[in-house]
Image (spheres, rainbow, N blue to C red):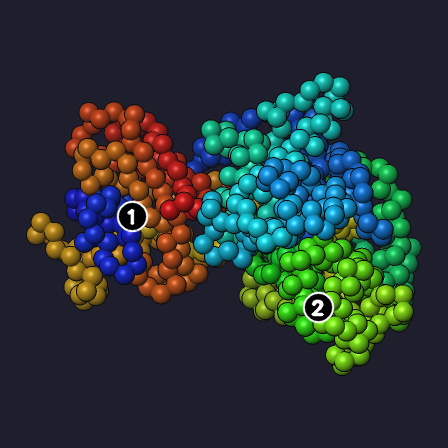
Amino acid sequence: MSESEGGAADAVSTSTYSSPAKSLGDPGITPLSPSHIVKDSDAEDAVEQLFLVVVAIDFGTTSSGYAYSFTKEPECIHVMRRWEGGDPGVSNQKTPTTILLTPERKFHSFGYAARDFYHDLDPNESKHWLYFEKFKMKLHTTGNLTMETDLTAANGKKVKALEIFAYALQFFKEQALKELSDQAGSDFENTEVRWVITVPAIWKQPAKQFMRQAAYKAGMATPENPEQLIIALEPEAASIYCRKLRLHQMIDLSSRAPVNGYSPSDTIGTGFTQAKEHVRRNRQSRTFLVENVIGEIWSELEEGDRYIVVDSGGGTVDMTVHQIRLPEGHLKELYKATGGPYGSLGVDYEFEKLLCKIFGEDFIEQFKIKRPAAWVDLMIAFESRKRAAAPDRTNPLNITLPFSFIDYYKKFRGHSVEHALRKSNVDFVKWSSQGMLRMSPDAMNALFKPTIDQIVQHLSDVFEKPEVTNVKFLFLVGGFAESPLLQQAVQGAFGSRCRVIIPQDVGLTILKGAVLFGLDPAVIKVRRSPLTYGVGVLNRFVEGKHPPEKLLVKDGTRWCTDVFDKFISADQSVALGETVTRSYTPAKPSQLVIVINIYSSEQDNVSFITESGVKKCGTLRLDLTGTDASVPNRREIKTLMQFGDTEIKAMAIDVATSKSVKVGIDFLNY
């Protein structure tokens, strides 16, 4: 419990090592109010802006796309126009997340267009162009993400990540507005659109804020009008869509009865072939009707029933556990989002390791630098064969090696690719006279194994948690969910515990769910906080309770420094609109800016900001300029923070004048 009569003191840490109270020039604050959470009833009644259309962008690691719905007809979800280009055997309702910049670093193209143009460049020319693919993972893997974080192009040159993400979002913004304008017959204004961008639920706050900054740079919304952009969490979006599924729109891997006209005695593979055929026939129609009724699966659910959504994409696998609340069918998150970098990129990485084993790591590194476009070609060839991998496959998979690979290898090593394969002793991979690597099905399946094992292991751990007992359904969604190998592994491991269900248009599930979320962001009523958040403060020193090294005597008063004043605990349940309230007072009456450092920890019970595992993760900035200066000497600034949304938000009020104070919460530039 903090003391309110203690006078202002230097309280917030700038370093986890020295006591912050002794560092000069720190903005001083003392908390005035005890820790508690109140339900802010006004949050529910926020003025809802009227947008004509909701456009959702599923910005994926391997592929991306957009879909939209007019707010007047929310049951119609339109998926974007088909893309030019495309690969044989791969649905092109999304386009690859690839971007090409000119040698002058200006935006040139995105998606298939970027890939094809880059591919057709002369090898000497292509060295100067900047080609990026699968760059989204950088936001997950960078520990200290900032606005200055770089991305590396295929030719080894670096560009600021914020620029690349902004270019990509601007491309989608322009495509969507053009399509909407064509439909409306007149120019469609950006102000009429509510944008939704999807991100993995396991992303930390800095990555979510980074996406928001990139969207501002792309001109989708502004810091003055942040409501125009919603950050949606991928497995949550999928969960919202899965509620609407009808029986003919899904494949029930554990079904005993025929579904989609095939019986479980058919292998999963054949069932999926039929589903693919169904999707192919429906592909010409880009409008999906989402019935206002609850799907049949849903009608089997009762108040309190639980289900898990596993979103397996290119970069991450991300899972969330939801509980249904009737009658409205609102959702409550039961266990904090969890997952990790176990996406299908892991399979590509295993293929690269295999190539290094056969041809030597030194050669592969050189080839990537000297022939970047040919390396991209090789990975595209692998991608289409990867999609043909299935548990019951008997015939080998052929991967064409680009001519420049064969040629460059001979120059580099002085002997042929064929010789390298013979010498490498890698079983199951042979050389075919047509210039291809022949991989046996076992060799291909072995590339999937490490990634699939990690997913199954992670899911097993989640199923052991007390909050995750009695799960009725497991919805497998995301692009990687199309893999029969992953389907079989998940069904084999968990089919006895719950029904494993795959929506038919599994690659578009998140996109459609994100549109539904944009139409009704309040559908998820309760979330779990992934981390413990708090600030560093001074409290009255209590003999016997506080460690002596934390004692600070100031003007005759004994203070304990570095106290962690907790806002919210890891895995704590937080309702939408629920706020944590704190009051702060400036150290000096003349002080116009209060900067409060925010700390986080994965641990639940934290006493001091100097404990191991406690990290400074952001700042809360209260700007008192423009508020009435003729207020009493002792000012009280009341701060309200919302943790129940997909992003952490803050607002503040000067208690003496009841005026709102400019407040910013920043997880990137601190």
* Image height of 208 relative to 313, above or below: above
Q: Is residue 374 left or right of residue 565?
A: right
User: Crowding near pointer 1: few (<14 within 10 Å), some, many (20+)?
Assistant: some
Q: Is residue 550 left or right of residue 173?
A: left
The structure residue drawn at horizontal position 66% and vertical position 43%, both measured from the top left corner, is: 100
- Secondary structure, mark 2, is helix
Residue mark closest to the camera, 1 vs 2: 2
Q: Return the residue nearer the eye: 301 or 441.
A: 441
Q: Return the residue nearer the eye: 231 or 212.
A: 212
Q: Position of residue 514 (x, y in %)?
A: 65, 41
Instruction: For residue 220, say whether it is visible.
Output: yes
User: Crowding near pointer 2: few (<14 within 10 Å), some, many (20+)?
Assistant: some
Q: Amino acid at mark 2?
A: Phe
The structure residue drawn at horizontal position 23% and vertical position 46%, both measured from the top left corner, is: 26
The structure residue drawn at horizontal position 57% and vertical position 50%, both measured from the top left corner, is: 157
Q: Position of residue 67 (x, y in %)?
A: 71, 37
**Badge 2 is on which residue?**
412
Q: Position of residue 605 (x, y in %)?
A: 37, 62
Q: Position of residue 615 (x, y in %)?
A: 38, 57
Dot label at residue 34: 1
Instruction: For residue 111, say whether it is visible.
Output: no
- Secondary structure, mark 1, is loop
Q: Return the residue nearer the eye: 135 or 636.
A: 135
Quadrant in the picture for residue 73: top right
Q: Of all residues shown, which one is farthest toward the left?
A: 556
If you read the primary sequence from the N terminus, does the residue marked by circle 1 or circle 2 appear first?
Answer: 1
The structure residue drawn at horizontal position 31% and vertical position 45%, both measured from the top left corner, is: 596
Q: Amino acid at mark 1?
A: Pro
Q: Of all residues shown, which one is farthest toward the right?
A: 261
The CA distance from mark 1 to mark 2 is 69 Å
Dot label at residue 187: none
Q: Of all residues shown, which one is farthest toward the top?
A: 186
